[in-house]
C-alpha cells in the first residue's frame, strides 16, 4: 500500500517507521517542504520518500494526518481537492498531556472539525488514544494482530482499508461507531483515552461496551 503522511514530527515519524517496516511505501510531507526531510527519510529502509503535501495526497492510497492540532487546518489547506480521499485523523485538540493541555473547541467533535478542513474526504479517526512512544514500540510489522486500535468513521469501505492496514502492523481495529459518536468516545474527554498501554482486543471491547452503556 502507498501511504501519505502529513506531519513529520514524532507521530509522523513513528507511523513512517511502522509502515515502512511492514513493506509499505510512504510519502512523508510537512509545511517546510521535501528538502527539510532529506535526513529523516533516509532512516526508513528505502520505502520512504519526501514530498509536498499535495503529492502525499495525490500519489497514495490513503493519508494520515499527524500534525499538531494548531497546525492541522493550515497544513491541509494547500490541497485543492479531497474528494473521495481516505484521511486517517490521528490528531487531538491538545498541546500537552493532562487537562491543562486540552484546547477548547467549543464542545465540537475534533474529527468532525477535521472533516471540515478536508471537504469531500472519507475521514477515519484512529491511533489517537495511545501515547506515541507506546504505540511505536508495541505495534510491530509481521506480528500476529493482537493490539487493539480504536477506529471511527462514516464510510465502511474506508474503515475496511484502515482495518487491513492496521493488521499489517499488528493492530486489530475496534470500531467505535460513526465519526460523531465514535469520535467523541475517542476524543479529549471521551471514555476511551487514558490507558498507558495498548489494550488487548477483549479488554478494548469491554471498555468500549462500558462506555456505550
Image: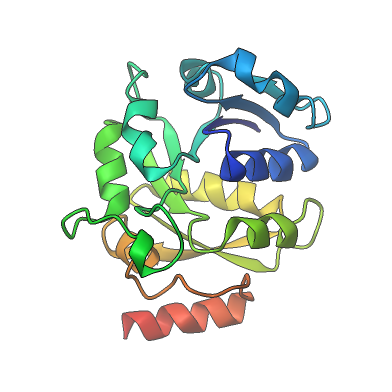
- Give x and y (percent) for residue 69: 37, 44
Q: Is residue 177 visible?
A: no
* Left or right: 67, with 134 as reference point: left
Q: Is residue 109 above or below residue 36?
A: below
Query: In the image, what residue occupies the spot 35% across and 65% down?
Result: 100
Query: In the image, what residue occupies the spot 60% across and 27% down?
Result: 28
Query: In the image, what residue occupies the spot 47% across and 81% down?
Result: 207
Q: Is residue 156 above or below residue 129?
A: above
Query: In the image, what residue occupies the spot 39% across and 27% down?
Result: 75
Which quarter of the picture shows residue 175? bottom left
* Left or right: 75, with 12 as reference point: left
Q: How many marks?
A: 0
Residue placed furthest toward the top: 35
* Left or right: 13, with 152 as reference point: right
Q: Is residue 173 visible?
A: yes
* Left or right: 178, with 142 as reference point: left
Residue placed furthest toward the left: 106
Q: Is residue 133 above or below residue 81?
A: below
Q: Is residue 84 above or below residue 64?
A: above
- Give x and y (percent) for residue 174: 51, 66
199 vs 66, nearest the viewer: 66
Looking at the rendered image, the quarter that the N terminus falls into is top right
35 vs 200, nearest the viewer: 35
Looking at the rendered image, the quarter that the C terminus falls into is bottom left
- Tell me which colouring the rendered structure shows: rainbow
- Give x and y (percent) for residue 124: 42, 48
- Give x and y (percent) for residue 73: 31, 33
Which quarter of the picture shows residue 16? top right
Amino acid at each position: 500500500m502507498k501511504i501519505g503522511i502529513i506531519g513529520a514530527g514524532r507521530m509522523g515519524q513513528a507511523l513512517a517507521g511502522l509502515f515502512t517496516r511492514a513493506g509499505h511505501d510512504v510519502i512523508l510531507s510537512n509545511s517546510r517542504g521535501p528538502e527539510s526531510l532529506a535526513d529523516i527519510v533516509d532512516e526508513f529502509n528505502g520505502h520512504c520518500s519526501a514530498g509536498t503535501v499535495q503529492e502525499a495526497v495525490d500519489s497514495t492510497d490513503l493519508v494520515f494526518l499527524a500534525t499538531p492540532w494548531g497546525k492541522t487546518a493550515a497544513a491541509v489547506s494547500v490541497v485543492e481537492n479531497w474528494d473521495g480521499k481516505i484521511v486517517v485523523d490521528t490528531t487531538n485538540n491538545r498541546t500537552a498531556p493532562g487537562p491543562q493541555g486540552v484546547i477548547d473547541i467549543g464542545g465540537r467533535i475534533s474529527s468532525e472539525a477535521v472533516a471540515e478542513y478536508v471537504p469531500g474526504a472519507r475521514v477515519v479517526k484512529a491511533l489517537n488514544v495511545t501515547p506515541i512512544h507506546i504505540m511505536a514500540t508495541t505495534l510491530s510489522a509481521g506480528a500476529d494482530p493482537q493490539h487493539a486500535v480504536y477506529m471511527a468513521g462514516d464510510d465502511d469501505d474506508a474503515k475496511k482499508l484502515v482495518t487491513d492496514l492496521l493488521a499489517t502492523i499488528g493492530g486489530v481495529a475496534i470500531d467505535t461507531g460513526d465519526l460523531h459518536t465514535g469520535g467523541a468516545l475517542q476524543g479529549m474527554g471521551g471514555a476511551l483515552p487514558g490507558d498507558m498501554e495498548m489494550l488487548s482486543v477483549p479488554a478494548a471491547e469491554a471498555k468500549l461496551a462500558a462506555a456505550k452503556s
